[in-house]
């Protein structure tokens, strides 16, 4: 596979942990890591325009094979000139393979060695996605980074089940590599292995032999106790090639991101910032504030006085509280802009701290076990 279009260089290393600040170069520009990536499931980050998204500091944006295959179909996205043109985002993009979404969203699914068959929740059609299908759809969608088609088992699961599914994910990865046809897209492999550190280590070492342009850690944040995430990441990340980006899928909480960065992870995604916004919740210094609360009715200060985002620079809590009560959609847009900025900025601040070798001192609070359950 040709991958000259992609490179990952290390800009600085933390002297106390495995954390690194890096630059991942894609055909649509650089991604400075560590970095949080917002989710644009259906070729849009819900309620946020690409121009607004650019102001949040987000660099790479995610979209989903599963959702775009069901609607509008990859043929339409391809005819439109690919995902970037279709959605008007000219920066780096990544598509998830559909593996995780088939397992978490569809009913009546059957998994065989060949692939997954399920009933479309849109129109009841029977749909078959094989590793080859997922790659072909992602080749048609045209994101910069595409993900291998994996099996993401639920939690809890027996060791035997996890072992079988991790082995299948490995065989599926080899089929994905074989099926991948576009050298201008980087195919990332995904490490599974559930909560079993030895299975994780084994899978990571196996994947590393393929010399892919990047690697992801999947199968976390699927219902296991959050404390296990750090153990899993620590058993996985160090076994992945040092000179390739590492991406922890579906994790976007402060503590888990900080701890994963300390273990050598570079990229994260999560629906948290946009999903919370649609429930009227704003992320402030690691907490979730319900802006709908009456206590904000006459509060003429921004969500966070220290936040540089468009929302905090121009609007008050009182105004947002009013918009939510009036069921105005602008509330979701403005809170999403703030929440995405907040999580991107958290990872950007960690990056700055790594560059100055101040990570463990400045982020000590997030690197310790969780005292009480927060975000
Ligand atoms: N696999 C894929 N996408 C994912 C996951 C996974 O395991 C997760 C798990 N948190 C989120 N998104 N393909
Ligand atoms: Zn803000």
Image (cartoon, rainbow, N blue to C red):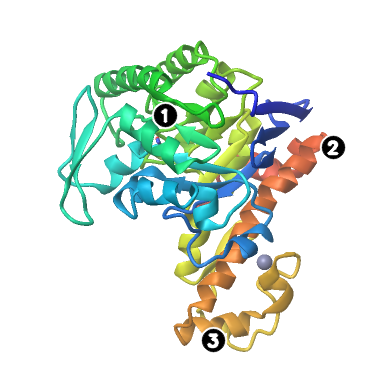
Q: Horizontal and vertical percent for residue 171?
A: 33, 17
Q: State whether label 1 is within 8 Å of ligand 1.
A: yes
Q: Nearer the viewer, mark 1 or mark 3?
A: 1
Task: Kindly check if marks 3 and 2 are in contact, taking CB atoms under 8 A apart as contact.
Answer: no
Residue on which disc 3 sits = 322
Label 3 to label 2, Cα distance in Å? 42 Å
* In-image side of 266 versus 233 (left or right): right
Q: Secondary structure at mark 1?
A: loop
Q: Is residue 175 depicted above or below 216 in this figure?
A: above
Quarter of the figure with residue 147:
top left
Q: Secondary structure at mark 2?
A: loop
Mark 3 / mark 2, whichever is N-terminal: 3
Residue on which disc 2 sits = 356
Residue on which disc 1 sits = 148
The numbered disc on residue 264 is none
Q: Residues within 10 Å of mark 2 (few under 14, many from 20)?
A: few
Mark 1 / mark 3, whichever is N-terminal: 1
């Amino acid at each position: 596979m040709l991958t000259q279009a992609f490179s990952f260089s290390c800009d600085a290393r933390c002297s106390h942990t495995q954390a690194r600040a890096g630059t991942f170069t894609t055909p649509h520009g650089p991604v400075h890591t560590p970095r949080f990536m917002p989710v644009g499931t259906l070729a849009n980050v819900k309620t946020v325009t690409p121009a607004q998204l650019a102001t949040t500091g987000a660099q790479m944006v995610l979209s989903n094979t599963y959702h775009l295959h069901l609607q509008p179909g990859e043929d339409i996205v391809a005819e439109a000139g690919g995902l970037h043109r279709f959605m008007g985002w000219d920066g780096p993009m990544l598509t998830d393979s559909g593996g995780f979404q088939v397992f978490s969203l569809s009913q009546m699914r059957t998994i065989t060695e060949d692939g997954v068959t399920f009933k479309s929740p849109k129109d009841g059609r029977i749909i078959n996605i094989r590793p080859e299908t997922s790659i072909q759809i992602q080749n048609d969608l045209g994101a910069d980074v595409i993900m291998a088609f994996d099996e993401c088992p639920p939690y809890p699961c027996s060791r035997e089940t996890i072992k079988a599914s991790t082995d299948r994910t490995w065989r599926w990865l080899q089929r994905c590599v074989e099926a991948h046809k576009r050298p201008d897209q980087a195919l990332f492999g995904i490490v599974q292995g559930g909560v079993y550190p030895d299975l994780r280590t084994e899978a990571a070492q196996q994947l590393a032999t393929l010399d892919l342009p990047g690697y992801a850690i999947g199968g976390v944040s699927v219902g296991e106790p959050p404390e296990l995430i750090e153990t899993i990441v620590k058993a996985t990340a160090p076994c992945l090639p040092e000179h390739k980006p590492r991406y922890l899928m579906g994790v976007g909480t402060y503590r888990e991101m900080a701890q994963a960065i300390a273990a050598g992870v570079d990229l994260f995604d999560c629906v948290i910032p946009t999903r919370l916004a649609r429930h009227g919740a704003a992320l402030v210094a690691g907490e979730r504030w319900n802006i709908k609360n009456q206590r904000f009715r006459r509060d003429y200060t921004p969500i966070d006085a220290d936040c540089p985002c468009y929302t905090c620079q121009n609007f008050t809590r009182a105004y947002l509280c009013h918009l939510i009560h009036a069921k105005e959609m602008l509330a979701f847009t403005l809170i999403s802009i703030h929440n995405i900025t907040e999580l991107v900025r958290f990872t950007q601040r960690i990056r700055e701290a790594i560059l100055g070798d101040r990570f463990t001192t400045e982020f000590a609070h997030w690197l310790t076990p969780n005292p009480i359950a927060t975000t």
